[in-house]
Structures are given as structure tokens and as C-alpha cells.
Image (cartoon, helix red, strand yellow):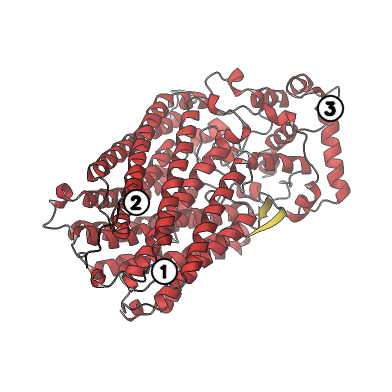
Amino acid sequence: MEESMSEAGYDYRVVRGFTYSAIFWLVIGLVVGLWIAFEMFDPALNLTPWLSFGRLRVVHTNGLGLGFGLAGVFATAYYMLQRLTRTPIAFPRLALAHLYLFNAAIALAAVTLFAGMNTSKEYAELEWPLDIGVVIIWVMFAVNVFGTLIKRKEKQMYISLWYIVAMTVTVAVLYIVNNLEIPVTLFKSYTVYSGTNDANVEWWYAHNIVGFIFTVPVLAMFYYFLPKSTGLPIYSHRLSIVSFWALIFAYLWTGAHHLMLTPLPEWIQTVAIAFSIFLIAPSWGSVLNGYYTLQGNWDQMRTNYLAKFFIVGITFYGLQTIQGPTQGLRTLNAFFHYTDWVVGHVHMGTMGWVTMVISASFYYMIPKISRADLYSIKLANIHFWLILVGQLVWTITMWIGGIQQGAMWKATNPDGSLMYSFLDGLTSLYPYYRLRFIAGVIYFIGILVFAWNIYMTTRKQPVEAEV
Amino acid sequence: MGINSKPVVFAVISAAVILVGTVATVFIPLFIPSTQPVSPYVKPYTAVELEGRDIYIREGCNNCHTQTVRPLRTEVLRYGEYSKPEEFAYDRPFLWGSRRTGPDLNRIGGKYPDSWHYSHMQSPQRLFQKSNMPPYGWMAKNRLDTSNSFKKTSILGYGYTESDVKNQIDSCRSRVTAESYASKESRNQVTPPELQKDLTEMDAIIAYLQKLGRDVKNMEAAK
């Protein structure tokens, strides 16, 4: 549809900028990830205070969640917004300022976290001056989202735009509420919530910020780039409507499944379990919508390199959304919580679903805006297999390690005493940690291939636009 | 559906939809006192303990250590009595954590003498050869910064006067620098001579660790 429209007027500078930023922070975040993976079985790498695990883990999660994840979301959102509304970005200079400010904020975030300035609240570690920066950055983005939507030439908003709107609104609410804090100095603040309430607010935030950055906009990409790269229309519009509203309604009730068997009031935990189970339905609504879109054209898994990124990606999303609610059940949670099982769970989502879909979206988008073919489909396939194998070895290793650790924590002798010391449980995991490190290296090589492929594509001479 | 062509209306409806669960499970509990009950037995942190807690946060200790003992048989056997909501009334932020690379610390207070902590923080591997905990001996080389301690306790509403805070700092200093201090030898081993008469970051974090889970014992005893 919008292909027929003239390219003139679309502003792709910000799309390119955010794409390169995403890849840059992805590489940095993975290097830090490998560093801390090594520290897990050999503490010798804790060379200085700022290289110690406690500080680096936060650099890793923020670098990849905010640096890579958000930049990927912004890159694709600016692209989809323009294409789906058939309208150039409303305020292109604001968008460029957004790009520069974003990268400055991520760099400052890394420096301050290295320096130990952090609030300790997961995925909300940044101190208050940077929180204000994040809010400003978000408002800059929101102004362009709504500005472009209001000026749009295409009357109907496609599914992907709903997800972008829902993300824009929800992330603002989550971020502001969870980061209400009273400054002590420029680098230190205290949250306004205490104890149990702080825990409840934090996990409402942490669960949903993951949902509205690593699920909602990634579904927007999926619903746009899957039909684009396969030439197949999405199977059911009605199913996507039902899934969308059910997902964004139910998501916000479930944060407390991270606080199972803690002093948080039991009713909040139980409500969270119920809604978590319910969430399987809308999640699988999108999974099935993806599968049925390929109905009759499954040969594209072989012939179209992009189809497999999207379909394997949504498969990990499907597995993720079954595993999550299952491990939230009280009995299973008592066994799995605080072990590496959960670490494996998170990384299936991030290394499987999120990275697969974002990188495939870039593979579609960058040749399109560079007016050149992808540098190498063969390299894209190598990238696919390396990150798939790396991720599978990574996550399965952590699941097995988690089961072992959970079992060792619970094991008792016939007289009722504990069978293993805490240290027994930890040291028995070192072989798994070594294997996890190797899996991480395989994955990292795959990402380097990806970065190289995109870089070489952008260096190609543009061919005449096919009108 | 009409709202698919009205972006602002769409955004407002989305906001309403996400706020239902938010209000029900997060906002309303904020105003129910039983969500975060208080107990006269659980006292706020002293200024030094609070500084130690802030160092715990700065170093990201919560990335490897939880502070919630769950009501499970083997967990209570391993760590002690399970965690009660009253214990966390003065915790801003909460530090329950999400992963146990190291053991839970909610009942660590009083479990070991200070001397054990000085040696262990200096080199975890000397006590447990295969431990993967980073060494924190450098904390004993940093003088404790108490310039904001009063401001901190005021913001947190602990109800101390400026002289209360000064007394807490002085009494902690005189306790750990006294000739009679039971952990004097281990402290002097890790603390450089020029700081041995002063409070260090290591002293503060150990004071904080020793506070964890102690008040709740009195609360339980009174039940």
C-alpha cells in the first residue's frame, strides 16, 4: 500500500541514528555481560570497585534494556510511524535532538552506574537527575508520536501503531510513579515508598517496564515487519484487536508474582497469579496470529531468511509467556525463585524473542532506507544460527543449574537437617557458569556478524529507487 | 472500531485500561496501613547503620543477596525465622533482591562477630576458598563520609536531632576504636593505620549487617 507513495519527505536520519545506537549499545552491553558471566565462576575479574559484579550487573541490564532495547524501539517506531501514517515525522529536529540526548543519557547512565550511583531498584537504578532526563527524552518522543499521528494521511491506525501508543502512555506512568524520590545530594536520593509498598511499586514497575519495552513495541515490529518481509497479510485483524486490549489490561495486575512468599499481602500475590495465567491467552493470540499468517507459505522458513527470525522469535515469545505464568505459581515459585532458572527465563525473552525481532526489523529497514540490498544474506543466516544456538545453550544451561540449585536448597537428611551448605549449592553451579560463558561468546560472535552486515550494507552505493 | 482513527481518544482509553490493575493492586494498598505495618520493637537505623546501608546499595549487594526469608521449612532451617512486614517499615528503598548468588542476609545480624565480617569482606576466598564474592577490603581504606547523615535521617523521618546523629556516630566510633573492642585485631588487619582511629566504610557496612533481623527477635519474643 504505502510502497506506491513517493519516498520524498520521510525523514530517515533519526531511524538510522537509532539503529546504529542500538547496535553500538548492544555490543557494549554484551561485553559487560560476558565480563560478569566470567566473574560468576572466577572472582578474579573483580579488579576494581567499578568492575565488581554488583556494579557491573546494573551496567549490563541498563545498557541492554535502555541502550539497545529502547534505541531499537525508537528506530523502528520512527520508521513505522512514518510509513503507516504516510506522513513525515511531525518535528524532525526534535527527533534528532531526541537521538543525541538519548545517547548522552545512556553514556551518563553507564558512567554513574560504574561509579556506584544507583537507587538499587531493578531497571530503575538511575539517580534522580537522570530520571528527569529520561522523562524529558520520553516527552520528546511522545510529542513526535502524537504529532505525527494527528497529522497523518492514512485514516486507520494499523495494529502496530496501537502498540506504540500504548507503550508511550504506559512507560510514562510506570517510570514517573516508581521513580518518585527525595534528593539528598545531586547523586543520592531516597524513594518516597517504604518497605513492602516500595517492593510492590517496584515490581509493578519492573514487570511492566519489561512488558511495555520488550513485549508491546516488539509486537508492533512483529505485526508490521512480518507481513512486510513475507508479503503475507496478518491472519486475523479481529484476533489482534482482542489480544491487544486483553494484554494491556491484564499486564498491570501481575507484578506481584515477583514477590511470591514475601511479606507482601497475600491477596496481592494471589491476584497476580490469576492474571498471569490469564495473560497466556492474549500472548498466544499474537503467537497464533503469526503462525497462521504463514499458513500455506511455510516454505518461506527455508526461502526467506527474514521469516525465520520472526517466526522463531515469536516462538520464544510463546514459550516465554507460558514459562512465566507457570513459574509464578506459588508451589513452583517456592522452588525456582532466586535460582538461575529465572535468569534463564529472562534471557530466553531477551536473547531469543527481542533480539531476533529487532535484528530482523533492522535487516528489513536498513536496506529499504539505504536503497541497497542487504550486504549478505549468507551472513544474516550465520548470524541467525549463532544467536539461536548461543541462546539455547545459554538458557537451557541456566534452567538445569536452577533446578539443581533449587533442589539442593531444599534437600534434607533423614533427621530433617539440611543436606547442603549454601556454598555447596553455589560451587556445584560453576561448570554450568563456564558453559554459559561459552554460550555467551557464541551469541556475541553472532551479534558481531550482525553488526558487520548492517555496517557493510550502509556503505553500499544506493541503487535507483524502484518506483 | 472508531477509536482506531482517533489517536488521542485511543491514548486516553489505553491509559484508563492500564490504570485499572494499577489502582487496584498498587495504589490502593499504599493507603491500607496493614500493607506496611509498624512495630514498636523495630527501630529505625542509626546514622552509621544507614550510611552502611547506603554503601550496600552503592555496591549493588542486592544483586546477589536477598533480604527475605520465605515461610518454607528448609528456608527457616537455613536462615532463621521467616521475614515479617514490620521489619521493613524504615527501609527506603526495600532491599529484598531477586536472585541468591549469595545467601539471604535478612537474619545475618548477630550470626557472626564483627571480626568474621572484617576478614570475610577483606577476602571472602580466605574463608571460603571457592566463593565467588568480590573482595571489599578497599572499603576499610575509605573514611566514612557522614556529612549528609543528619540530612538523610531527616528525609527518612527517623526523628533524630542533629546531636542524636552526632552521638550515634561518636558512640560507634568509640566502640570500634576502643582497646577493648572484641574484633580489634581483625579490624586493624584490614584498616590502614591512619584510619584506625576513625570510622571507615567497612565499619559502617558491618554495623548495618549486624542490625539486620535483630529487632524482629524482640518482636517475636513478645508475641
At 42% from the left and 29% from the top, the residue drawn is: A433
Residue A165 is labelled as 1
Element on which disc 1 rests: helix
Furthest-right residue in this view: B163
At 81% from the left and 45% from the top, the residue drawn is: B147
Residue B221 visible, this angle: no
Instruction: Choose top left, top right, bottom left or bottom right for residue B223.
Output: top right
Type of residue at label 3? Thr
Q: Give the position of the N terminus of chain A as an image quadrant.
A: bottom left
Residue A214 visible, this angle: yes
At 54% from the left and 24% from the top, the residue drawn is: A44
Q: Tell me which numbered mark, 2 or 1, is placed earlier along the sequence.
A: 1
Chain letter for mark 3, please: B
Q: Do labels 2 and 3 share a chain?
A: no
User: Residue A421: percent from the left, percent from the top?
Assistant: 51, 24
Other-residue count near label 3 (Cα within 10 Å), few / some / many at <14 / 14–19 / ≥20: some
Judged by depth in the image, the label closer to the viewer, 1 or 3, is: 1
Task: State the CA–CA distance, disc 2 to disc 3.
Answer: 65 Å
Labels 2 and 3 touching (C-beta < 8 A): no
Instruction: Choose top left, top right, bottom left or bottom right for residue A346.
Output: top left
User: Residue A295: percent from the left, percent from the top?
Assistant: 14, 58
Residue bearing mark 3: B177
Instruction: Choose top left, top right, bottom left or bottom right for residue A163.
Output: bottom left
- Which one is in front, B30 or B139? B139
User: Residue A326: percent from the left, percent from the top?
Assistant: 35, 48
Chain letter for mark 2, please: A
